[in-house]
Amino acid sequence: MMTRSIDRLFIGGEFVAPHGTEQLELENPATGDVITRVTLADEVDAARAVAAARAAFEDYSRASLSTRQEYLQRIHDAMARRLDELIDIVGTEFGAPQWFTKFAVQDALGHWRIAKEQVRPETFRYPLGAGTQIVLEPVGVAGLICPWNIGLWFMCVKTSTALAAGCAVVIKPSELSARQNDAMAEIFAEAKLPPGLINVLNGTGDVVGDAITRSPGVDKISFTGSTGVGKRIMRTAADTMKRVTLELGGKSPLIVVDDADSTRAVAFALLVGFQNSGQSCTAATRVLIPASRRDELLAALKAGVEAMKVGPATDPGSAIGPMVSRKQFERVQRYIQTGIEEGARVLTGGPGRPAGLENGNFVRPTVFVDVDAAMTIAREEIFGPVLCVITYTDDADAIRIANDSIYGLHAYVAGTDVARAEGIAARLQAGRVAINGFVDEPRAPFGGFKQSGVGREFGRFGLEAFLEPKAIFTG
Ligand code: NDP
């Protein structure tokens, strides 16, 4: 494949040359070949983008709700026309298996439609008692800072919601998603929106992300990424009292209840444990099993993991793809090594690459057993296909172990008696709990308890995060 150069930013409704000069090379994660050379934005570009968004916000914040709907529809339609191409781009750049990429890109498209549905007059203005009106105004210019684990999806979720609320945006996607970022910028250009309503900057977090977070011209930051960076953003944003929504890391538990059907429970564990090749903040990476059924469940888990095919996005049979970058591959390898050094036993997988996949950033799907809840691999987010199995004695012990984490993004329960599983779910400290499977309800709030974040995305909660309530009293 030819190396593509991306040396343009989308600012003020047009593609412009970056003021920044730093270059970055991106590799195909499945082969290690350099596929993209990207020129990065700097603080000057960030300031131009913020100024363009500020100017656009003046008109857009006063535009009719039907105008907001029309823009959302136009972006939806422009994206729908390029769906197959976007699926290819994500596969090449990010490496996720085809079935997952298709799901993610289609889901991203759906968010433009859902955002449009949310633009209803009664959401933005309603009476409350005699002589009182509640008005929800757009918060202003929103800085949207996204991670790489399907960058395109995060851009769509955050931008669609911000636009539905009446905000103008500056997007700082991950520079590892440069091709996705550029394709989405083309889609925004095709939608013929007012100049500056959406601006897209390829740039690093410590330069462009930080400039946006500091800028007095930005009113709100919506960030998805690691807890460490989230804390830094919250501190920096405090200087200008920006509103922040932070979607951060996780170390989600799956409790397999002692009445669970082992086949169903293991299928669920594989689905939620290895989702997005483990590069998912919601991955169920702590599998809690009852001591009474240990041997049977471990045998089923080992067989299930060993049947999962690791391979490139181009192979339709791949269940687990490569890590996004060499850096991420090495990070996962370090954690596998730490697990071994701390005394956990490898049930399957281990260090290194799977046989026959020596070139890309492929990891052997790994399951650790005899894991103590105090070990590094049981506490820190690995962000790769690595599961830790921890045994428990009874339901109360399982709940205690599940909640013994700084994180609280997601939790999972597998069990036959649904009322009992729901009772366990009620006691878990997590923004979402899935019992026996996934129900894909894109309007349900998404976000974390504890250090998994601040605020929620999706649906009504997500929209309100871009709105500022105002009470008007008429005497
Ligand atoms: P990072 O936190 O490193 O980066 C996320 C984004 O923030 C990137 O665009 C990054 O830019 C930017 N950034 C970095 N430093 C700063 C800064 N000082 N100011 C402003 N922006 C900054 O996460 P990754 O991209 O590596 O993604 C993986 C992490 O994200 C995982 O730990 C995972 O848990 C978390 N995550 C959470 C999700 C959730 O919804 N809760 C979903 C997906 C991921 P740059 O790329 O240049 O560093």
Image (cartoon, rainbow, N blue to C red):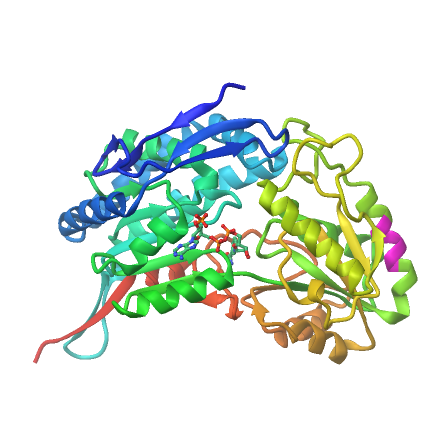
Assign the magenta stretch its main secondary structure: helix
Q: Is residue 307 left or right of residue 172?
A: right
Task: Classify residue 356 as left or right of residue 411.
Answer: right
Residue located at (70% from left, 62% from top): 377
Q: Which residues are magenta?
A: 297-302
Task: State the image coordinates of residue 405 (x, y, percent, origin top left).
Answer: 63, 72
340 over 14 or under it: above or below = below
x then y, percent, for residue 296: 91, 59
- What residue lies at 50% left-to-right and 29% top-to-bottom? 89
Q: Is residue 118 visible?
A: no
Residue 166 at what x, y percent from top left? 24, 53
Q: Is residue 6 visible?
A: yes
Residue 140, relative to residue 157: is it above or below? below
Residue reaching furthest top?
A: 2
Residue in the foreground of this view, choosing between 437 and 100:
100
Tell me which corner region of the image, top left, top right, bottom left or bottom right, holds residue 256.
Answer: bottom right
113 left or right, relative to 153: left
Q: Residue 259 in the image: x percent, y percent?
A: 83, 67
Looking at this view, is 141 or 344 the one in front? 344
Farthest residue in the right direction? 295
Q: Is residue 33 above or below residue 333?
A: above
On whether residue 301 falls in the magenta region, the answer is yes
Which residue lies most toward the front here?
22
**Residue under the point 66% across and 31% down:** 312
